[in-house]
Image (cartoon, rainbow, N blue to C red):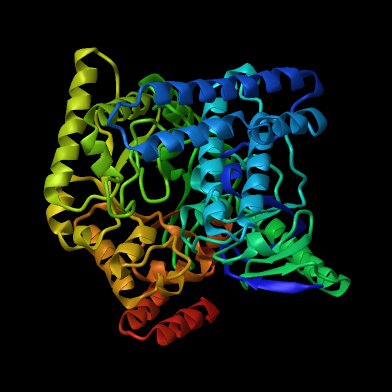
Amino acid sequence: MTFSIHGIGVSEKIAIGKAHLLAHVSLEAPHYLIASDRVDAEIKRFEAAVRDVQEEFVLLQDGLDDDAPHEMSAMLQVHAMIAQDNMLIEYPKSLMRDKRYNAEWALSAQVNELVEQFEAFEDPYLRERKQDVMQVGTRIMRAIREHAGLVIENNVRPQAFDDDMILVAHDITPADMLQFKDRALAGFITDLGGTTSHTAIVARGLGVPAVVATGQARDLIRENEWVIIDGANGVVLVNPDELLLSHYRGLQVEQRIHQTSLGNLVYQRARTLDGSEIKLMANIELPSDVQAVQQVGADGVGLFRSEFLFLNRLHLPEEEEQFIAYKTVAVALVGQSVTIRTLDIGADKNLATDDYITPLNPALGLRAVRYSLAHPDMFLTQLRAILRASAYGKIKILLPMISSLEQLQQALNLYYKAREQLTEKNIPFDRSIQVGIMVEIPSAVIILPILLPLIDFVSIGTNDLTQYTLAVDRGDAEVTHLYEETHPAVLRLIFNTIDLCRRAKKGVSVCGEMAGDAKLTRLLLGFGLREFSMQPAQVLSVKERVLKASSKKSRKAAEDVLLQYEQVKIRQRIKDLNQKAH
């Protein structure tokens, strides 16, 4: 029987494929098939990890003080028993032998199976024991990663998915999304998330359809069921009949034809009808994304999210590793600018290192530049790596989440210290390198006239600016309907920032999701924006809008939008603006 699930579409594309369910521990597990001649080695890797965890529980129990709470001892005993249970440690081996699952995938599959069994119990106490299974499973998963070198060599990541496979999960973190970047996947469906959650951003960057905030898709959809993702309408169709399949396949063909036509714009300069030159930059997460930047003819990298070098690992990257990553991008882009944002950890991007403590309120806690200032050695390491890379290309430094003058001064002091450290060792770097800030907090807009003399440029992060202005968690499906990038207060803050920067003759760009939304291109042009930075997959669609727009006429329409305070009228004004011939 066909049924529909509604959520939020994060792209206007359509996907048709078979569901592959992800949940619980599997969200942290890479999924791939191992070669038949490596099965025994993979099983040994798993067994070594299990032994580590079992020995760890013995040491923890032996190390308990005499006055330790009885509950602590009892909990450790329960977890130690689970770590010895054949249901948890033997069945994954069968999956490795019979289906050639890698160790992480095999473990997560079995943990999920056990969790579902516990969830079926009527007794609340027994039902909650699923948490114990998940916690032990997580410990084993972490231990498996420490033994990763036994099988995964030379960064080989075997293909395990078909190009018609659609991932269905309760949630997928940005770190998890990176594991699917180079996989042939049709799309994503999640219970949680929002239009500008980092999961949605990465999915959009992959150029695949996705629907988030469905609420219950993971529970309603079954493995291998046929699914249609209608990204434009935020709808998921499960078990579609032939009539629906035929209709959506026709729409898919139309989308592909249009996408092919956009390819003709790759080498065309982004210039409005009245001659305004527009820079269309790309956002990237990893050095490997440079190829996508070049394929769409972007003008450079407007946002290199460096935090993705720090995720999915137990230890922070060393200076040399970071230097090589930044240098690789700078060299590959041959003279085009690369703006590297310093570590923006927090919110829904958390470190896996032993000393990292997730804040009580990740969005408002020790995140971004706050975390960097609290860990100056780590910050200096990153700054030195970026500075060293600047000797090989046109690099800029971007400081995230600046909210006060004192905070900016502290960050700049460390930046100058990093310069001094390199100078003392005669290590070359670009001494005219530009330093800018992200404007993503309302306080930064208000005090921007004080901040501008200290910096070279500004990049507006519309995702967090909207979140903090409206007090709406952009990743919370319960309040996602309140997240409005075109809220009059948000639009006024964006306009004011652009206007202040232009008057002060400072560079200004937008690197949030608004920059890649072609429906808002003319509005931002009307605000005076001349530099956009977006996911590579969005560059050509935005360029198409730029080529058909007049910056002067867009300005008049944008002024009218700024006079509106009702969301309905704002949406209508933007719709009217996009329907005009220029």
**Residue 336 visible somewhere in the drawing:** no
Q: Position of residue 54 (x, y in %)?
A: 53, 24
Residue located at (40% from left, 33% from top): 73
Which residue is at the far top?
A: 425
Mark yes or no: residue 217 visible.
yes
Q: Count the labels in the image.
A: 0
Residue 116, compared with residue 462, is above or below; it is above
Asked if residue 143 lies left or right of residue 224, the reply is: left
227 or 522: nearer the viewer: 227
Q: Quadrant of residue 158?
A: top right
Residue 255 image position (x, y, % from top left): 71, 64
- The quadrant where residue 393 appears: top left
Return the residue nearer the eye: 179 or 88.
88
| Residue shown at the point (58%, 38%) measured from the top left | 291
Residue furthest right as drawn: 242
Q: Quadrant of residue 323?
A: top left
Give the answer, above or below, for where 571 lies relative to 26.
below
Q: Position of residue 395 (x, y in %)?
A: 36, 35
Most foreground residue, 490 or 434: 490
Please state, as top left, top right, bottom left or bottom right, where the N terminus lies in the image: bottom right
Which residue is depicted at the point 78% across and 63% down?
A: 253
Residue 174 placed where, x, y %? 50, 46
